[in-house]
Image: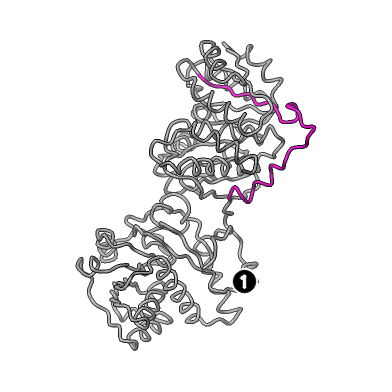
Amino acid sequence: MSSLPHKLYRAADVRELDRIAIEEFSIPGIDLMTRAGEAAFAALQFRWPGARRIVVVCGAGNNGGDGFVVARLARVQGLAVSVVVATSLESLKGDAKLAYESMVAAGVEPQAITSELLADADVVVDALLGTGLDREVGGVLRDVIVEMNAATTPVFAIDIPSGLNADSGAVMGVAINAAATISFIGLKQGMLTGDGPAYCGEILFDDLDIPLAAYDKVVVAAERIEYDELSALLPRRARTTHKGDCGHVLVIGGAPGMSGAVRMAGEAALRCGAGLVTIATAIEHAAIISQTRPELMVQGVNDASDLRPLMKKADVIAIGPGLGRSRWGVAMLDAALSADVPLVVDADALNLLAVEPHLRDDWVLTPHPGEAARLLNISTPEVQAERFSAIDKLQCKYGGVVALKGSGTLVLDQDGALSLCDSGNPGMASGGMGDVLTGVIAALIAQRLELTAAAKLGVCLHASAADRASVAGERGLLASDLMPHLRKLVNGL
């Protein structure tokens, strides 16, 4: 086993890698299947060292063949192993049939699945369906998955949880809820976004010793990004640095009654190193924001004429936190759209943009799935079912760099390069998290980072801060809890 790779692939690409290994590098398919089974069994023993009773549920394809190898190895190791074949034995072909025959020769015979069989096991191995699934699971296979999920025994999925779409991360009607999953050859992009993280559990990886030259022949679908890998974008500051070198962020938002969002965005920008931050907000909020965070320069604005002098001083504009959708919010957005500096657009600015779309290259859009649905005039479930397609459509329609937030946030730039951040946690499901991200990205742009770099680093920085803040527990995590961790991270601490 190895650490998770940064290159992500679609299912068809992994099948192509498999073909290249067999046909161009002369690795027999049964050897690859044996390597997969050996890697899976080793991972099972590492993850559940006390497991003595194993149930392996197999399908007819190569995924089932991997499971037959696991069952044979478990029997050789003296474990009590039971195998369920959720298909007719006559449907077994090729390498899967060879693996089945080797398993039977080792003394393992298939048996019927029962709730008692699953309940008595220490671990259930899911080798039912592989990565080629492209339609909803039905019939006997659906019944088997439902029964496996109903058991309290932890499930270890081989390559991908059965029923999870490897490309989109969507559940195809029903899917195995795994405690852990081991992926082979290439890490599938759908495992890390949408429903993928919830159904995969802990993700392990083994490349099965595929030659590195094979990977040069296949296009990577996306890049998995981490803060540690991107932190070099924020080198230590020169001793002569002054605030003017670190950029001026203008945050526009905070309609009457919504001062908190714009304040958090402004503070996040300061904590991430912006030299100056000005808040343009409803007049009634100016005094209270200044009192609670005096380092923020706060200006109450009535209309666009009040806003324009502030825009002239800004290196980047962040608009949307607490903006609202009233006439005031519309006027603020219209003014911001006339600016000739980069924009970070979030929250109600996105909702207003959905009503009157604009296309430009010099902005970062940061929608959550609901905002993305409004921007594309589709439903939120449709966005979540096809997150990769949704972000592609957003970028084509609105331009710039798009960060589609959620479990496994995606970042797509103007050149079509796709990145995925798999950091973060469910504690981030609370108000204000998106406002903080807006401030983070704006601060990075103010410090002269290119838009794509700022979006990628900002997303990872935000998620990593949330992971640090969640040490005390995910439930009850506040957006403001991220502030001290943001400061430490941007300083390499």
Residue 315 falls within the magenta-colored stretch: no
Mark 1 Cα-neighbour bin, 10 Å: few <14, some 14–19, many ≥20: some
Across and down, in percent, residue 249 comes to: 65, 26
- In screen coordinates, is 10 left or right of 310? left
Q: Which residues, given as a range, are shown in magenta?
A: 226-254
At 42% from the left edge and 34% from the top edge, which residue is drawn? 430
Front-most of 392 and 430? 430
> Where 461 sits versus 58, above or below?
above
Colour convention of the picture:
one colour
- In screen coordinates, is 166 left or right of 336? left
Across and down, in percent, residue 418 comes to: 59, 50
At 51% from the left edge and 45% from the top edge, which residue is drawn? 409
Q: Please tell me how many numbered marks the rendered image carries.
A: 1
Residue 252 falls within the magenta-colored stretch: yes
**Residue of label 1:** 214
Across and down, in percent, residue 396 comes to: 58, 42
Q: Residue 94's quadrant in the figure?
A: bottom left
Amino acid type, residue under disc 1 in the picture:
Ala
> Where 223 sits versus 374, above or below?
below
- In screen coordinates, is 328 left or right of 340? left
